[in-house]
Amino acid sequence: MNKFPILMSSGYIGGVELKNRIVTAPLWTGFGGRNGSVSPRTIAFYTEKARGGSGMITIEYSYVDQIGSKSAPGQLGIYDDECIGGFALLAQAIHDQGVKCAAQIAHAGAMKFLPIAPWLGPSDGFHDLSSMGPLPPLPITGMTKEEISVQIEAFAAAADRVKKAGFDMVDVHAAHGYLLTEFLSPHANKRDDEYGGSLENRMRFPLEVVKAVRQRVGADFPVTVRINGTDYAPDSPITIDEALVFARMLEQVGVDAIHVSGGTDIYLDKLATPTYLKNGFNVYLAEAVKKKAGVKVPIIATGGITTPAFAEEILREGRADFIALGRPALADPCWARKIEEGRPEDIVPCIRCNDGCLRRTINFSRATSCAVNPRMGFETIRIVAPLKNRRRQFSQQIGPDGADEGE
Ligand SMILES: Cc1cc2nc3c(=O)[nH]c(=O)nc-3n(C[C@H](O)[C@H](O)[C@H](O)COP(=O)(O)O)c2cc1C
């Protein structure tokens, strides 16, 4: 019998059955074309991920319009009907491996790696969510109500394209400091109209987006939302109590699952926790939503879930219904398949070093890579042959004087 029975049991999001409780978290790769197109490299990367046997692959955040929503170089875009063809190829490549797929749709707001205006946000001015990496904080233009309406329509149209491309569901990015979080955040949102101030007002725009998405894709197409349990902003953060209210409201407007993360791309150590912070750093946020918000829809926990034993424990203790793998699925795309095949000890663990996936992407605008998986992003080029003596211990490989004894 499999040692991880709950993890490997099937589950539903909306009417869609996932063969196990493992979903891959959306993770920007930078492999897209200049206009946001799906490239052969994108397809190769996600095909390899899908071969790895997760219940569902969520593809990286894709921008919804051409007026400031793009966040990063090589990011995928779903801003026009012309984008549907490439997304359809991607959905097909994942389905061909027997795996369900979701696409995440996003507007950058002021959170960009790109020096391309406009930096749209809830309010004029600067806040430390604007720009990332080597860029200085850049001036944000507070959105007019007309611009808010334009973006609501952009999200709805993007979700419709995701559906037309053949994805199984759409995920709305309302986490990590991007536009929807900026409206929720008292740290970033200084408006004094019906979109700012009270929590009810700060939730208005994200909820209008989700309602419009739901309306456009119809009742039967699952819609999920990724939220922040907290953003860890040093002053006026989104608090967990606010996140609980937001989760309840999301359920009321008809979402099928809530994916709970934490942190922003500026408070990045809390979002993609480095090895010196404990595993599952943000799981308590998913647990709070699951146990305290009183919502019935499935909750997805994420962040630093690097071993199947820990994933099973989270599910067994009822802290979440599904677990999401971000970096661990880069380190080893076959994470789920190795469990299915009864050899979980062969999983190459993510060491949460943040070197290839974050340091080089943010500091040098490079595409994503992985320090422990040289094939990541080079799936069609680099063939890694298995070792002849694969169970030999490291201590046996290094001689007493430190010299490598070789094969
Ligand atoms: C290189 C990189 C890119 C990411 N891109 C996205 C993204 O497109 N959308 C998103 O919601 N989260 C994104 N994240 C956050 C991850 O989905 C995930 O929440 C985070 O890495 C923590 O989970 P993990 O410990 O399993 O990696 C990204 C993280 C990294 C390291």
Image (cartoon, helix red, strand yellow):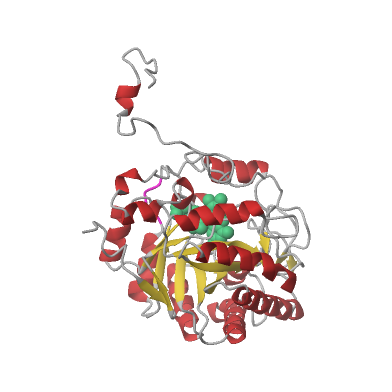
Could you say which is closer to the camera, residue 89 or residue 184? 89
Q: Going by the image, does 259 lie left or right of 37? A: left
Residue that protrudes farthest toward the top in the picture: 401
Per the picture, the main secondary structure of the magenta-coloured stretch is: loop
Image: magenta residue range: 277-281
Instruction: Tell me what residue is drawn at x 31 percent, y 67 percent.
Output: 9
**Visible in this render: residue 245?**
yes
The furthest residue to the left: 1
Question: From the image, which quarter does the C terminus lie in?
Answer: top left
Image location (x, y in percent) of residue 300:
41, 67
Question: Relative to residue 257, is residue 341 depicted above or below?
Answer: above
Magenta region includes residue 280: yes
Q: Is residue 177 one of those drawn in magenta?
A: no
Q: Residue at x 24, y 58 (%)?
A: 2
In the image, taking residue 153 as reference, residue 316 lies left or right, namely left
Residue 184 appears in which quarter of the rendering?
bottom right
